[in-house]
Image (cartoon, coloured by chain):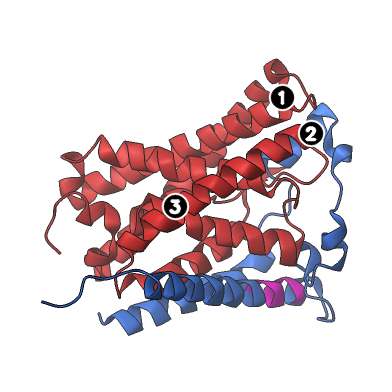
């Protein structure tokens, strides 16, 4: 399989999982949240001031109707964002790598 | 396992932020040597997959869920240095864009979910070179590394909570380990499924296979 096709396919699978599957994921507290609730320190949790203005708080995209739609939109936005950020960072890191001159 | 702000003391936040920044800086230097042409887009695709899979909380027990951490997956595909950087990008976006995991505790979350998992995986891979020569052996190694990495992350989180004075270690460690022993099974199943899929179509892109000395 050509690399471009593989990458496109992987990104498509990730987007499908983040949009189509994520609205049906368990909404129960995760392991740490459960322990925090059971042991009574969950109320110590606060939002950092910069998070008050987080664009997609709690994986619900603002302005998208319905819980499942808002989660799916958040999944799409997040998956594309991390793809571009990581791809871009890797490209910059590679360009700055000193290479031996061709013989 | 994303710690929100408020769970850890400012001293623990300071130490873990400095520690995580130092390790990621070192990882960036080491990762430059591992970045060939094919890996640049693979870094993006791995980050996208880890983010998407982290959204899929699965039921474990008694009204509790777990989700993939992804350091094992990223490390088996990309090696430990690129692997921990990929998970760190995901954690940073989650904290700033999704308010998932705190900002002052980002260093702690990075150590727990990215650095510890990648280093555990590197150690497990390093100790199992002969086993990894076969694809089935590699998948078995991935499963073990996945489970151990979740246990290690839960242990690191417990220690940070205890040192912060939030809760005694004798209370938090058994509670964290018992629930994450189950979540680790999910981490293993998902990591194995993804690595097996990549092995089926592009085995040359799996670092854990390359590093075993198997010609692509």
Q: Residue at x 57, y 62 (%)?
A: B89
Q: Is residue B90 visible?
A: yes
Q: In which quarter of the image is residue B43?
A: bottom left
Q: Is residue B47 above or below residue B140?
A: below
Q: Label 1: which residue?
A: B163
Looking at the picture, how far across and down is residue B163, in whole percent? 71, 24
Looking at the picture, how far across and down is residue B186, in whole percent? 50, 46
Q: Do labels 3 and 1 share a chain?
A: yes
Q: Report the Cα–Cα distance between label 3 and label 2.
A: 26 Å
SS assignment for the magenta stretch, majority:
helix
Q: Label 2: which residue?
A: B9
In the rendered image, the quadrant that contains the N terminus of chain B is: top right
Q: Report the Cα–Cα distance between label 2 and label 1.
A: 8 Å
Circles 3 and 2: CB atoms closer than 8 Å: no
Which colour is chain B painted? red
Q: Mark 3 lies on which chain?
A: B
Segment colored magenta: A70-75
The chain displayed blue equals A
Counting residues from the start of the chain, the first of labels 3 and 2 encountered is 2
Q: Residue B27 carries which label?
A: 3
Counting residues from the start of the chain, the first of labels 2 and 1 encountered is 2
Q: In this view, does A64 lie above or below B142?
A: below
């Amino acid at each position: 399989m050509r690399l471009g096709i593989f990458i496109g396919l992987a990104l498509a699978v990730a987007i499908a999982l983040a949009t189509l599957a994520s609205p049906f994921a368990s909404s129960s507290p995760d392991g740490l949240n459960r322990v925090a609730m059971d042991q009574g320190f969950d109320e110590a949790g606060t939002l950092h001031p910069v998070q008050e203005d987080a664009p997609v708080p709690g994986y619900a995209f603002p302005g998208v109707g319905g819980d499942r739609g808002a989660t799916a939109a958040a999944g799409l936005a997040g998956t594309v964002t991390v793809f571009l950020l990581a791809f871009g960072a890797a490209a910059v890191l590679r360009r700055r790598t000193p290479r031996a001159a061709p013989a | 396992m994303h710690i929100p702000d408020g769970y850890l003391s400012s001293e623990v936040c300071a130490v873990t932020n400095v520690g995580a920044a130092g390790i990621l800086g070192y990882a960036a230097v080491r990762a430059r040597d591992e970045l060939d042409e094919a890996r640049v887009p693979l870094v993006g695709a791995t980050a996208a997959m880890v983010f998407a899979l982290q959204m899929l909380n699965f039921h474990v027990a008694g009204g509790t869920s777990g989700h993939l951490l992804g350091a094992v997956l990223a490390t088996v595909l990309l090696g430990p240095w690129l692997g921990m950087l990929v998970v760190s990008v995901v954690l940073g976006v989650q904290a700033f864009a999704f308010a998932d995991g705190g900002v002052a505790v980002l260093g702690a979350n990075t150590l727990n979910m990215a650095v510890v998992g990648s280093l555990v995986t590197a150690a497990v891979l390093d100790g199992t070179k002969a086993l990894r020569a076969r694809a089935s052996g590699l998948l078995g190694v991935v499963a073990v590394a996945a489970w151990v990495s979740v246990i290690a992350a839960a242990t690191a989180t417990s220690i940070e909570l205890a040192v912060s004075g939030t809760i005694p270690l004798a209370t938090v460690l058994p509670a964290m380990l018992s629930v994450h022993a189950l979540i680790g099974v999910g981490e293993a199943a998902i990591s194995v499924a993804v690595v097996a899929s990549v092995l089926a179509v592009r085995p040359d892109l799996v670092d854990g296979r390359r590093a075993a000395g198997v010609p692509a």
